[in-house]
Amino acid sequence: MKVDWLIVGAGFTGSVLAERIASQLKQKVLLVEQRNHIGGNAYDYYDDQGVLVHQYGPHIFHTNAKYVWDYVAQFTEWRSYYHRVLAVVNGKPVPVPFNLNSLYALFPPNYADKLAQQLVEQYGFNVKVPILKIRESANGTDLKFLADYIYENIFHHYTFKQWGLKPEELAPSVTARVPIYVSRDDRYFQDEFQGLPKYGYTNLFRRLLNNKNIKVLLNTAYQEVIDEIQCQRVIFTGQIDEFFERMYGELPYRSLRFKSFYTEQEYKQPVATVNYPNEYAYTRITEFKHLTGQRVYGSAYIEEYPQPYKRDENIPYYPIPKEEYQALYKKYQAEIEKLKGRVLFAGRLADYQYYNMDQAVARALTLFQKVICKS
Ligand code: FAD
Ligand code: UDP
């Protein structure tokens, strides 16, 4: 088979690049995907009871980049949605990211007033402070107590379950994703643009890839077909260490196991996601109807059980943000230079970066404009 481009991986990164190349450059793309569906980890489907579920965990699109939002909006209408998360702490549901409302959910009103006042005095109002920063900087007995309390009850055990590491052993950016927010705003994200594709992610991907210049080959690892395909260039969005046959050793990833449930209740829980930092082997339970707004009998939800990643056994969902692994990634990155631009690398697995969906889209759009269009 002869094409202009071979793209490996039909997640956001590979699919956006396929769409740009096919629609703007009018060149032929073969998109090869080893799973039996498009969409990568954003894939969703209707289960046996007719509930729209996210196979690989809850996906909420959020961004401050208008160009990313506008780009994706060409392929879908949006359902406006603000994600809200509760964490169960000592049996009480507490809004997360931890904010001023969380104080009142946990402590008697007078003490919550006092802590709120001190937080505002020390950090200002409407300010986000990562937990590791608060622990270093909290002044006075009450704020020190609060910093330790939040660390212990929200972050420490959850992070250990999720990564098998303590918060301080990871890049500070990991726990900074969910900062303490000195505010009454208890949405999980504050980005300007937030929502879910009105007809689901898979529908959005179908529309992205609906171009006569794109051919999609599912159930196929690129290694199986690479010798039969003549192409000018390759874009690889899989694991970078796999591409280079792990010549410097395996890059570590973190995996998850999802356990799915169906209930005949209208709703199982009050918000889409409830975190369990301190109990159980799972980290969180997500109920999909809250996300999708679907009106259907019964409800579906999943528990997420973090796992070590084992090659050929489970899926590498997360690169592990830790300095020594970045150093190993850099060795692979140096190998890219030697390919002289014939193979381009992008995406959560190929860049070994903890991208959100909007960052994966931004990465693909930038690669297209700055590299592909100029070469
Ligand atoms: P992927 O989606 O991983 O796609 C890569 C594709 O390449 C995969 O389909 C894979 O099968 C394929 N592939 C790999 N190797 C090969 C090979 N050798 N041959 C053929 N195919 C191959 N982001 C948000 O913005 N909001 C959220 O709420 C959110 N929630 C998340 C929840 C969970 C549990 C997880 C794991 C991620 C979440 N994300 C979220 C992140 C989001 O999933 C990623 O940003 C996005 O999937 C990255 O897209 P990608 O194309 O780079 O990678
Ligand atoms: N985190 C935590 N407790 C929580 C929520 C998050 O300790 O209740 C930490 C944990 O280390 C987690 C990180 O913050 O891995 C990022 O959380 P996020 O919800 O962004 O994770 P993702 O949705 O990417 O799994």
Image: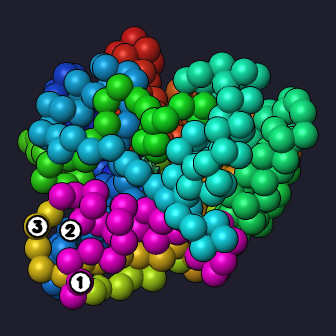
The mark lying in front, picked from 1 and 3, is 1
Nearer to us in this view, 149 or 244:
149
List the single residue furthest toward the top: 374
- Identify the residue at horizontal 49%, vertical 59% (top origin): 86
Color style of the picture: rainbow
Quadrant for residue 221, please give it. Answer: bottom left
Is ligand 1 closer than 8 angstroms to the Cβ of mark 3?
A: no
Q: Is residue 292 visible?
A: yes
Asked if disc 2 and disc 1 are in contact, CB closer than 8 Å, the reply is: no
When the figure is inspected, residue 118 is found, relative to residue 318, above or below; the finding is above
* Marks 2 and 1, the one that precedes in the sequence: 2
Q: Which residues are magenta?
A: 264-293
Dominant SS of magenta comes to loop
Q: Is residue 285 part of the magenta span, yes or no?
A: yes
Picture coordinates of residue 337 (x, y %)?
66, 28
Q: Which residue is mark 1?
A: 265
- Identify the residue at horizontal 81%, vertical 38% (top origin): 143
- Identify the residue at horizontal 46%, vertical 55% (top origin): 85
Q: Which residue is mark 2?
A: 52
Question: How much space separates mark 1 and mark 3, taking CA atoms?
Answer: 12 Å
Picture coordinates of residue 109 (x, y %)?
61, 48
Q: Which residue is mark 3?
A: 295
- Please tell me whether mark 1 sits on a helix, a strand or a loop: loop
Picture coordinates of residue 328 (x, y %)?
80, 45
The mark lying in front, picked from 2 and 3, is 3
Q: Is residue 340 part of the magenta span, yes or no?
A: no
- Horizontally, residue 325 falls left or right of residue 284, namely right
Q: Amino acid at mark 3?
A: Arg
